[in-house]
Amino acid sequence: METTHTQYKHCDLVKAQGRIDSATAPQLAKALDDITGAGRHKIILDLSEVDFMSSAGLRILISTQKTCHRYNRGEIVLAAVPKRIHDALELAGFIPLFKFYDTVLDAVGSI
Amino acid sequence: MNDSVSRNTQSQSRSKKPPKTSPDSTPDISSETQDIMVYPAQFENLDHVREFVGAAAQKCGLDTSAIYAVQLAVDEGFSNIIDHAYGGECLEKIECKCQISDAGLTVTLRDCGVPFDPTAIHDPDLEAELEERDIGGLGLYFIRQLMDEVGFSFMRDPETGKRCNVLRMRKRKEI
């Protein structure tokens, strides 16, 4: 699993590629923690090239959202979520907890 | 204890006797294949076990959506065994058995870790607000939602005599 990070003026974009499971989730956690640790709390997570995500990944999304929401600082939004991943998020009751964008461009323009 | 992965494959053909009341009917031949892999309890083996059950699901004739569901359920079960039965990654074993029949695929995960009581795990609250959202129990919930039948039991390991947890999951083939 690979993550790439692009810092914009008003937000940060993290793109994850590959499979997010208990083996690789710590990498994603670190990528997101590094951003929030630097005091930046508006994050777009591009999931377009994620082909598998287990509850290990979902845990990280929730904990990052809690961190970003604290003190109304910001949020993490999800962009280009593949159908399988979206279905899993729905199964877990996560849809109301995040904003979803079809493309990264839409997300960058809206966050 | 060595940390290698090991495999055991069996194919069995069973024929049912034709019913006596209709001598013209042809006998029902059903066949079942069984494949077993044993993995050390380490997260790096998630890729391998997902590939193993994915191949079995495909061979069974499940559609792509069902194959993903099986892989996700098995991933959750395998991860839970590492975290809870064994208290973290170690060289203890997790056995994964795939049984393919005309009806569908049965995957059984077996470990000899801490005895597991599924009734002690409550379903996550899917409607809680963000702050109250608790992540515990999500893996088990996924397994129950993704698979058609889920059962927990105990058995004695025939070699070591140790008590094992057995998690049996079944995905039926869509007709």
Image (tube, coloured by chain):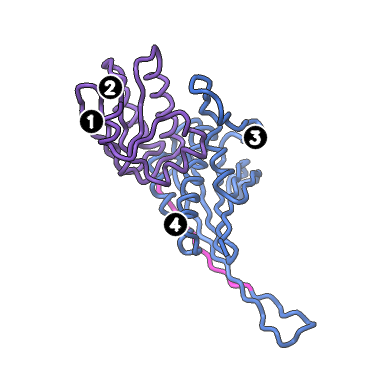
Chain colours: A purple, B blue
What amino acid is labelled 1 in the image? His
Residue at 33% over, 31% down: A28
Is disc 1 in the same subunit as disc 2? yes
Q: Is residue A89 above or below residue B59?
A: above
Q: Which residue is mark 1?
A: A5
Vertical placement of B55 versus B115: above or below? Answer: below
Residue A35, numbered label: 2
Mark 2, Cα crowd under 10 Å, few <14 / some 14-19 / many 20+, is some
Q: Tell which subunit mark 4 falls on.
A: B
Chain of the residue on which disc 3 is drawn: B
**Exactly how many numbered labels are in the figure?**
4
Start-end of magenta stretch? B3-14
Q: Tell which subunit mark 1 falls on.
A: A
Q: Are circles 4 and 2 on residues that touch, CB within 8 Å? A: no
Position of B76 with respect to A22 (left or right) is right
Q: Secondary structure at mark 2?
A: helix
Q: Amino acid at mark 4?
A: Thr
Specify the subunit that label 2 lies on: A
Check disc 1 and report its element: helix, strand or loop: strand
Up/down of A101 relative to B65, above or below? above
Report how far apart the C-alphas of labels 4 and 3 lie in the structure. 32 Å
